Amino acid sequence: MKLRVGWILGGIVAFIIFAIAYMPATHLIGRVSLPKGVSVNNVSGTVWSGRAQQAIVNGLPINNLRWEISPLALVTGTLSADISGGNLRNSDDIAFNGNVATNLLSLDHLKAHDFIIYLPVDRVLAQVNLPLPVNAGGRFKVKLDDVSMGETCRTLSGTGDWLNATVAGTQGPIDFGTYSATLRCEGDDIGILVSEPNLLGLSMDAVVAPNLKRISVEGKFKPDESLPDEVHQASRFFGQPNNDGYIAIKL
């Protein structure tokens, strides 16, 4: 009798797992309340392996979102998924690829490792409260080796690059080259350390809130002689050069 009950219970569990595994993702999306500012369109595939033609997050479009969820991770109460989105070769796309995980009891806390993100610079700057308007181009490339973050930064190691950096000038876009940074947690916020060499002679330490609504910057820069005169003239708005030719930055 006990054996028969065991087989019945096992069959019920297997049926539930099978039903969830092959549940169309569009059925689940239609029944859950997505976070404010998030929408998903044209969903296909299953809960475990699916795609959305487009997702909108706080006004930012993410095209061709795809996911593969690990069923085994659910045993430990963890939702783990390999996700990707956008086109890495399209400079106008928000694009990413890697693994993310979250505790099923605390969905606002995310972990990731070996995660790569490409972000159009103009779209990122539109989300940041800068003291001066900046019309800039290029792409941010962020490589996250290890990150644990929610409303605050808990763990962060990785690098960031501003690729093909340009800033609008009076005669057209000015090429500023490429800039590299290391990433870390700075208290509850994100620390970004930029070092030379680069065309601006820039070294700085910036601290940014995870929601991008607060930023502070401290550093120095000395524009390269190859940059246009308007860059050297504009740099004087930040102050006078010191004896080494560097101008201090503090925002």
Image: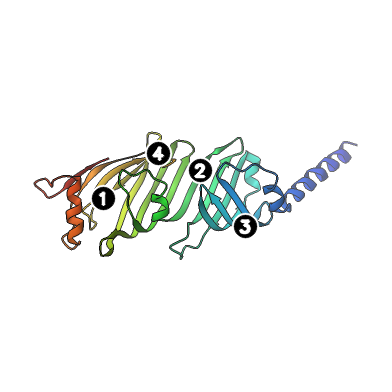
Q: Residue at x 13, y 46 (%)?
A: 240
Q: Position of residue 169 (x, y in %)?
A: 27, 60
* Mark 2 surroundings within 10 Å by alpha-carbon count, few (fewer than 14), some (14 through 19), many (20 or more): some
- Labels 1, 3: front one: 3
Q: Which residue in the protein does label 3 denote? A: 51
Location of residue 119 (image quadrant): bottom left
Position of residue 1 relative to residue 201, above or below, is above
Q: Position of residue 65 (x, y in %)?
A: 57, 56
Compute the Cα span from label 3 to label 2: 21 Å
Q: Amino acid at mark 1?
A: Ser
Task: Find out whether the residues at labels 1 and 4 contact each other: C-beta distance under 8 Å.
Answer: no
Q: How many marks?
A: 4
Q: Which residue in the protein does label 2 denote? A: 111
Q: Amino acid at mark 4?
A: Ala
Q: Residue at x 62, y 49 (%)?
A: 70
Secondary element type, mark 3: strand
Q: Earlier in the sequence, mark 3 or mark 2?
A: 3
Q: Is residue 54 visible?
A: yes
Task: Find out whether the residues at labels 3 and 2 contact each other: C-beta distance under 8 Å.
Answer: no
Q: Residue at x 41, y 49 (%)?
A: 126
Q: Which residue in the protein does label 1 denote? A: 195
Secondary element type, mark 4: loop
Q: Is residue 104 left or right of residue 14?
A: left
Q: Which residue in the protein does label 4 denote? A: 209
Question: Closer to the camera, 11 or 173?
Answer: 173
Residue furthest out toward the left = 243
